[in-house]
Image (cartoon, rainbow, N blue to C red):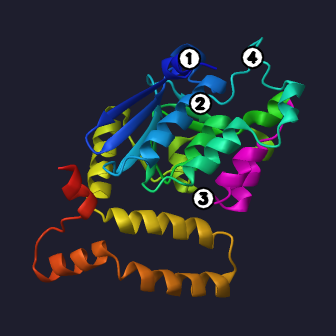
Amino acid sequence: MTIEAASSVVLVERRGQALWVTINRAERRNAINPHVIAGIHGAIDAAVDDATLRAVILTGVGDKAFCAGADLSKGTDVFSPEGLDEPTTDFGRLARRVRELGIPMVARINGACVAGGMGLMSLCDLAIASDQARFGLPEVKVGVFPLQVLVYLRRFVSARHVNELCLTGELISAARAHEIGLVNEVVSYDRLDERIEALVQRLGAASPVALKRGKVAIAAMEALGFAEALAFAEAQIAILSRTGDAREGLAAFNEKRSPRWIARHEAS
């Protein structure tokens, strides 16, 4: 796979404090193929290494689809047996890399978000959706099951709702997605970018160190029982309170001014 192939189907653009990553396959409803995964993976690699970024925005071109899942068109060999040769998948490797991203990743849901699109959305920390968007896991209708998506989706949605999505394969509205906790906010399509930018500004005002260490803590505590998670949190808050950002935040609070985070100062 060439870098050119990946870059043609995934557009990457710096917009202020955020890196916008846009799936560029409108003719296939922004469906996933190996080039798309590679393009997103490459963008995340760049974001991991950029201390001046405050967010990554993941979306799709147009107003019809965020991502329609895997490309099932004839000749794509999505269910090829050759895929069994490796113990991990392209999507799985992308998910592992996203876990190393020390800044928030935001899903801008501009349209249909189904199957693998739900997986991509579930990799994100936050999601804002257009009221035109629809959500679902229709894999059972083509003889498979959304197993990889379940790994991430069950962190956001209760078991009953996840079961309904998986077992019926039916789509739900953006309003229903918000109701069950799939997305943070639903707005009209013409206000989507406005709300995304407002969210980026809010994230940009937060301590980069607190966000980075906080994301690591959230991921770690998912796998811990109550007692272990509490002990881990107690140790982490002791460490976090001794960081430069914590000292600056306290000083700014007492001096009634905006904090000057080190990473932001270096980027200016």
Residue in the image at 18% along x and 68% along y:
259
Judging depth in this view, the residue of 149 and 264 nearest the camera is 264
Proximity of marks 2 and 1: CB atoms separated by less than 8 Å: yes
Residue in the image at 68% along x and 39% along y:
91
Is residue 2 left or right of 247 when viewed as pictured? right
The amino acid pointed to by label 4 is Thr
The amino acid pointed to by label 1 is Ala
Judging depth in this view, the residue of 49 and 96 nearest the camera is 49
**How packed is label 4: few (under 14 Cα within 10 Å), some, or many (20 or more)?**
few
Which residue corresponds to mark 4?
Answer: 76
Nearer the N terminus, badge 2 or badge 1?
A: 1
Let me know if residue 33 appears in the view.
no
Is disc 2 placed on a helix, strand or loop?
A: helix
Question: Looking at the picture, how far across and down is residue 207, in whole percent?
Answer: 31, 65
Q: What numbered label is drawn on residue 5?
A: 1
Which residue corresponds to mark 2?
Answer: 38
Is disc 1 placed on a helix, strand or loop?
A: helix
The amino acid pointed to by label 2 is Ala
Question: Looking at the picture, how far across and down is residue 46, in whole percent?
Answer: 44, 40
Which residue corresponds to mark 3?
Answer: 156
Question: Looking at the picture, how far across and down is residue 79, in whole percent?
Answer: 83, 26
**How packed is label 3: few (under 14 Cα within 10 Å), some, or many (20 or more)?**
some
Residue 263 in magenta stretch = no
- The span shown in magenta is 143-164
